[in-house]
Amino acid sequence: MTAAHVTLCFLLRDGADGGDVLLGTKKTGFGRGKVVGVGGHVEVGETASEAACREVMEEINVVVHAHDLIPAGTVDFVFPARPEWNMATTVFLTRAWEGEPSESEEIAPAWFPVGRLPVERMWADAEHWLPAMISGQRIAVRVDLAADNENVAEVHTVEWAEPEA
């Protein structure tokens, strides 16, 4: 599978009813209108953690340091009807950042209770892996999308062991 290497970074905080996670409504490009995690492509010469930190700054205007990233797992997205959309995603969590999340040209951020994710406004795969990663499970996930490139055909999950540095 030839896939674009991308990252996602989920900011977590303690909320009134338990934990909150920062998500954002995508304003442009791929996934426009959907509620998504903060992230994007890993550029040539970047590590996944460097890309996550850069994307967080570009999309929600806060500074995250690589040493504050918590590796959560991986998600491989397979689009059989559009293989050029395939993505190999490295997922991070963090509880430490500098600044207050704010809107950019690409993302309108908002906090959501972890127990009430807006799955009806997210990609259909999110409910299959995001709650597990937020709760501390470290997993490797493969999501096979259906021919409509929206719905999930299959999800395969295995325990994930972080690669050694």
Image (cartoon, rainbow, N blue to C red):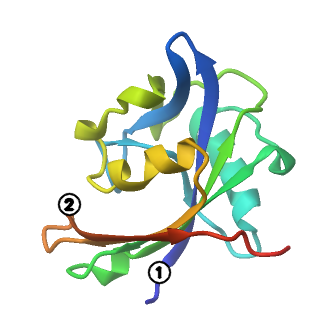
In the picture as drawn, the residue positioned furthest to the top comes out as 16
What's the residue type where badge 2 is placed? Glu
Tally of numbered tags: 2
Left or right of 34? Residue 48 is: right
Question: Upstream in the sequence, badge 2 or badge 1?
Answer: 1
10 Å crowding of disc 2: few (<14), some (14-19), many (20+):
few
On the rendered image, what quadrant is the C terminus found in? Answer: bottom right
Left or right of 85? Residue 75 is: right
Residue 71 place in picture, x, y as percent: 70, 56
Q: Is residue 84 visible?
A: yes
What's the residue type where badge 1 is placed? Ala
- Marks 2/1: CA–CA distance: 18 Å
On screen, 110 above or below 89? above
Q: Which residue is mark 2?
A: 150
Q: Who's the residue at 30% across and 51% down the image? A: 123
Left or right of 17? Residue 42 is: right
Q: Which residue is mark 1?
A: 3
The circle drawn on residue 20 is none
Residue 53 place in picture, x, y as percent: 72, 49
Q: Who's the residue at 25% across and 79% down the image? A: 82
Left or right of 135? Residue 147 is: left
Residue 29 place in picture, x, y as percent: 36, 53
Quarter location, residue 164: bottom right
